[in-house]
Image (tube, rainbow, N blue to C red):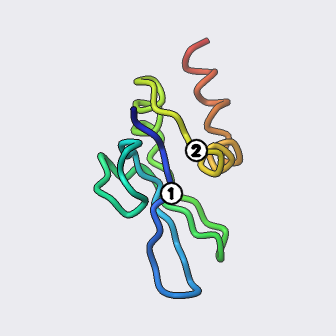
Amino acid sequence: MVKLRLKRCGRKQQAVYRIVAIDVRSRREGRDLRKVGFYDPIKNQTCLNVPAILYFLEKGAQPTRTVYDILRKAELFKEKERTFS
């Protein structure tokens, strides 16, 4: 099973995260299938590869709660509803 999960990068006390599609059995810093976004909680910046995220969601990937909140703030699920309607 594939999940959309945060992968920690950056320095001590200055964490930034990549949003990645990764196998459930892999550890947090493990090998990812594909990088689909970027999140910086300090500067509150988000960069998303929307087609890649929609592809993985259509294939059954489950976002973690934090990734789900990031995608909801970016209004990705409204775009998803528009494409299917």
Q: Earlier in the sequence, mark 1 or mark 2?
A: 1
Report the residue at 45% width, 62% height from top: 7
In this view of the protein, which residue sits in the foreground, 27 or 70?
27
Question: Which of the pair 33/47 is nearer the observer?
Answer: 33
The residue under label 1 is which amino acid type?
Leu
Local crowd size for mark 2, using a 10 Å CA cut-off: few (<14), some (14–19), many (≥20) = few
Quarter holding the C terminus is top right
Where is the N terminus found, in terms of image quarters? top left
Q: State the residue at coordinates (32%, 48%).
A: 34
Does 51 appear above or below 85?
Answer: below
SS for tag 1?
Answer: strand
Q: In this figure, which residue is indicated by the disc labeled 2?
A: 64
Q: Is there a contact, CB below 8 Å, between mark 1 and mark 2?
A: yes
Residue topped by disc 1: 6
Where is residue 36? Give x, y as percent.
41, 49
Closer-to-camera residue (77/26) = 26
Q: Is residue 77 above or below residue 64?
A: above
- Disc 2 residue type? Thr
Within 10 angstroms of label 1, few (less than 14), some, or many (20 or more) residues? Answer: many
